[in-house]
Amino acid sequence: MNHEVRELNDAELEAVSGGMTCETACVVSNIHQMTAIALGVLGNNDGAQYFSGLATGVFNGGCK
């Protein structure tokens, strides 16, 4: 399985954030990150990684 890491362009970032303001993206990103932490503590590493990725994507999409 090959996963390439690349930078998103402006249109892709807008799609990730759903047009949120940076302030809203920060709140949503924090909710995703707290969910990731909770799942990690409960031993669900796959779920934790998924929500951590969502947090990063929403933050980057809304604030960069």
Image (cartoon, grey):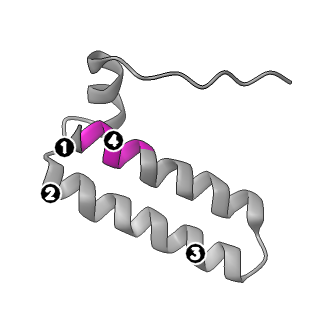
Residue with the mark numbered 3: 37
* The residue stretch that appears in magenta: 57-62
Disc 2/disc 3 C-alpha distance (Å): 21 Å
Residue found 36% across the figure and 46% down from its top = 58
Residue 20: numbered disc: 1
Label 2 Cα crowd, 10 Å radius (few <14 / some 14-19 / many 20+): few
Sooner in the amino-acid sequence: mark 4 or mark 3? 3
Q: Which is more toward the observer, 4 or 41?
A: 4
Instruction: Identify the residue position indicated by label 4 in the image.
Output: 60
Which secondary structure is most common in the magenta stretch?
helix
Secondary structure beneath disc 2?
A: helix
Circle nearer the viewer, 1 or 2: 2
What percent of the width, then of the height, locates residue 16?
Answer: 36, 34
| Amino acid at circle 2 | Glu
Residue 7 image point, x, y percent: 44, 23
Q: Is residue 34 above or below residue 49?
A: below
Gap between marks 4 and 3 measured at Cα: 19 Å
**Residue sitting at x 54%, y 49%:** 53
Separation of disc 1 and disc 3 at Cα? 23 Å
